[in-house]
Amino acid sequence: MSFFCYLSGPRYWVLAADNKKNVLTVKTMESGRFATHEVTTGDAHKIHPVGGGWWMTGAGLSTVLHDVREHVREALEDARWGAEPSVSVMGRLAEDPGWLRRIHRRCVAALTEGLPAGGENPEVLSGLQEIVFTGFDASACPVVLRTRSDDNFSFRRRSGPAVVGFTGENGVWDGAVEEKIRLFLTRVAEDLQRRDPSSMGDRAWDLIPPLFQKLAKAFPHKLSAHGDLVYLTPQGHRWFLF
């Protein structure tokens, strides 16, 4: 498991993600043919630019996240040469997520190919896959596109200020925990909207890491208290480590 969260203001996004990543590798070993390794070094950053002012984060199989990023980057790069707005490209990708389902099936098949016949597949292969894209429309209004494997990768679109979201909402967390997370992020969003734009990134860096610290303390084998945070505007971004 890992954790990401996001929130929007009138003309900005804040994304944060912990740096705990489970990497499934298939190996030929006497004791078994797969292993799961925890990665908490600098190469475990989970927030990535994909082009055209759009950024991506997510949770689940890292191979799926990587291949999805590359697919979207190529689509946005092709559109750039054709002068198609990036928000239009993202809208097209969200309207028909068959490409994402195919990537997911291909990655899972590749990971299970070397497993012993008749044995149980690692639980991580059937775990929840979540993917989020954030960006801005032509009027600089924040837009988020979010999809989950348990919803057949159908995309949900939300836009405007005061959008709040996080890993596993609507079913994964205990109801009381989910409500506390949502309330925490809502209060952060309200605080940021009272700040000068020049200080919002630093203020988010002050306010959001305590949430990760609390979650890591409650779920030490699943979440990390450390990660990265990105403050996005239509003009650019600031990137922080915590």
Image: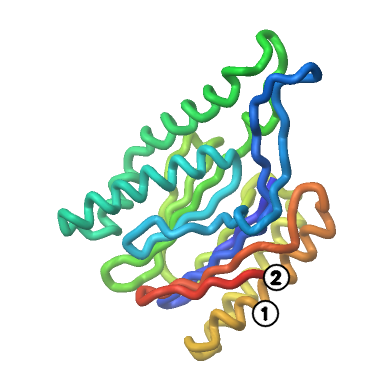
Q: Where is residue 23 in the image (x, y as percent from the top left)?
A: 65, 39
Q: Quick one: SS at disc 2?
A: helix
144 vs 210, left or right, is left
Q: Quick one: SS at disc 1?
A: helix
* Residue 121, placed above or below residue 92: above
Looking at this view, is 75 or 114 the one in front?
A: 114
Q: Which mark is residue 230?
A: none
Looking at this view, is 177 or 23 the one in front?
A: 23
- Report how many numbered discs are placed on residues in the image: 2
Question: Looking at the picture, which amino acid does disc 2 mark?
Answer: Pro
197 vs 172, left or right, is left
Q: Which mark is residue 206?
A: 1
Q: Which residue is drawn at 39% across and 60% down?
A: 54
Q: Where is residue 106 in the image (x, y as percent from the top left)?
A: 47, 26
Looking at this view, is 225 or 139 the one in front?
A: 225
User: Mark 1–mark 2 contact, CB under 8 Å?
Assistant: yes
Q: Position of residue 189 (x, y in %)?
A: 58, 75
* Residue 78, placed above or below residue 198: above
Looking at this view, is 87 or 21 the one in front?
A: 21
> How far separated are the C-alphas under marks 1 and 2?
7 Å
Visible residue check, residue 48: yes
Please, which residue is most extreme toward the left here? 82
Image quadrant for the C terminus?
A: bottom right
Q: Where is residue 134 in the image (x, y as percent from the top left)?
A: 43, 60
Question: Looking at the picture, which amino acid does disc 1 mark?
Answer: Asp
Q: Which residue is drawn at 82% across and 53% down?
A: 220
Q: Which residue is drawn at 26% across and 55% down?
A: 88
Image quadrant for the N terminus?
A: top right
Please tell me in which quadrant of the rendered image residue 194 appears: bottom right
Visible residue check, residue 158: no
Residue with the mark numbered 2: 209
